[in-house]
């Protein structure tokens, strides 16, 4: 029997060359957001990657399939990863490890200036503890290379103790393996759009490490699908983010044997909703969280999905789309973090 992923590989055989540990096998649904779309004059749709199976879901499930595939191929028994205190990637990495019988060792970076108890103990932190991850903390949240280097030091120590560690590096100098998951997601979306008769004129997605954004873009272009893919900046300003997406997309395209597939004009980023910075609330994000909950019963988070939705609403209001265009908002998950943001969401003073 042909599985879901096999049907994606039929459209892009080069994707089948990479080791993958299956954590999800089936497409996520695309749903209309009629009320919210009507407010901004477009046909708004949402692809529910927040519902991907595994410990409360999210985009990193697709990315992890390829990191974990590589870790198993390399004979690892322990996985190391670094991320912000409320990182979804770290939570899902621990969950993926548990699913496959590996040992999760995680490093939490002080990336967001928030001292309140909920941020530091609830949401993803609580889930990490339930998953039994070994947690260390790292004070320098904005230095990706230093965070990766510290992980490498921990890996070295574990190796000396007899473990076989694999490090999921976040820095730009390591191969963009996780982006392969979103190459697959773009093929899945195109297949759905054809099968369900859904024309898609634009895609909007959160752009952080850029592997979701770059992966989707590469998958689309390798399929000959010229849809504009708008990345909403969640971590860096538009200038450096544009450079990062272009570099990651070209690396991914090269991994798949098509180094010329991505042109600079393909890279669209918008940082209107980023201030005051990563993981910090602003009025546009607060509005998006409220509108998606009250108009669509769709929960989004302040760091990623709610910020990306705020960006989609901004693009619609500022004329980036034509009236009636079909705009696909890719919901990348992140909802468990809302419990760490209770004080922002309630407007209450931090505990
Ligand atoms: C829920 C969620 N959405 C979006 C992103 C951004 O994805 P990427 O890092 O691939 O740009 C992340 C990254 O951690 C995330 O956790």
Image (tube, rainbow, N blue to C red):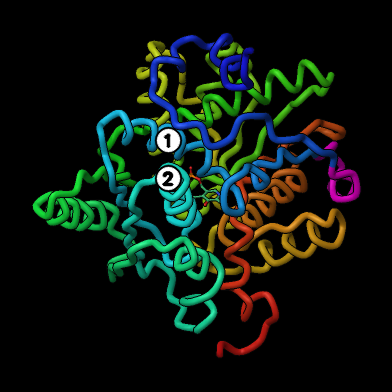
In the image, residue 141 sits, relative to residue 246, either above or below, namely below
> Residue 18: x percent and y percent?
39, 21
| Left or right for 220, reference 202 | left
Q: Do we see residue 277 in this rendering?
A: no
Residue at 50% across, 55% down: 88
Q: Are marks 2 and 1 in contact (CB under 8 Å)?
A: yes
Q: Is mark 1 within 8 Å of ligand 1?
A: yes
Residue 253 appears in which quarter of the rendering? Answer: top left
The number of discs equals: 2
In front: 6, or 332?
A: 6
Q: Which residues are magenta?
A: 33-44
Where does label 1 land, which residue? Answer: 178
Residue 59 visible in the shown view: yes
The residue closer to the viewer here, 25 or 248, is: 25
Q: CA distance from mark 2 to mark 1?
A: 10 Å
Q: Which residue is mark 2?
A: 209
**Residue depicted at x 57% and y 47%:** 54
Instruction: Say if 114 sits above or below 55 in the image.
Output: below
Task: Name the side, left or right, on which 79 lies relative to 5.
Answer: left
Q: Residue at x 59, y 69 (%)?
A: 281
């Amino acid at each position: 029997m042909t599985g879901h992923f096999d049907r994606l590989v039929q459209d892009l055989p080069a994707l089948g060359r990479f080791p993958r540990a299956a954590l999800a096998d089936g497409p996520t649904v695309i749903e209309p957001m009629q009320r919210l779309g009507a407010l901004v004059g477009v046909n708004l749709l949402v692809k529910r990657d927040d519902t991907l199976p595994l410990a409360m879901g999210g985009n990193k499930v697709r990315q992890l399939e390829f990191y974990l595939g590589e870790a198993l191929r390399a004979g690892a028994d322990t996985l190391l990863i670094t991320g912000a205190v409320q990182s979804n990637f770290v939570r899902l990495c621990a969950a993926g490890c548990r699913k496959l019988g590996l040992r999760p060792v995680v490093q939490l970076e002080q990336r967001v200036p928030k001292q309140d108890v909920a941020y530091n103990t609830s949401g993803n932190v609580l889930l990490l503890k339930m998953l039994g991850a070994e947690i260390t903390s790292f004070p320098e949240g904005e230095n990706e290379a230093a965070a990766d280097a510290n992980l490498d030091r921990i890996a070295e120590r574990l190796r000396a103790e007899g473990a076989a560690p694999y490090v999921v590096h976040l820095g730009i100098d390591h191969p963009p393996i996780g982006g392969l998951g979103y190459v697959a997601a773009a093929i899945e979306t195109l297949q759905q759009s054809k099968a369900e008769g859904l024309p898609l004129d634009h895609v909007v997605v959160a752009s952080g490490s850029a592997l979701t954004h770059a992966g989707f873009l590469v998958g689309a272009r390798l399929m000959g699908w010229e849809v504009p893919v708008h990345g909403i900046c969640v971590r860096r300003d538009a200038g450096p983010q544009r450079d990062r997406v272009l570099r990651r997309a070209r690396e991914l395209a090269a991994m798949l044997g098509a180094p010329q597939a991505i042109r600079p004009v393909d890279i669209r980023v918008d940082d209107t909703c980023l201030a005051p910075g990563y993981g910090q609330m602003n009025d546009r994000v607060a509005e998006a969280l409220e509108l998606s909950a009250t108009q669509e019963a769709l929960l989004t988070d302040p760091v990623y999905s709610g910020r990306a939705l705020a960006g989609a609403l901004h693009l619609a209001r500022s004329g980036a789309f034509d009236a009636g265009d079909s705009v696909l908002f890719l919901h990348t998950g992140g909802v468990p973090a809302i419990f760490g943001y209770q004080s922002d969401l309630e407007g209450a003073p931090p505990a």
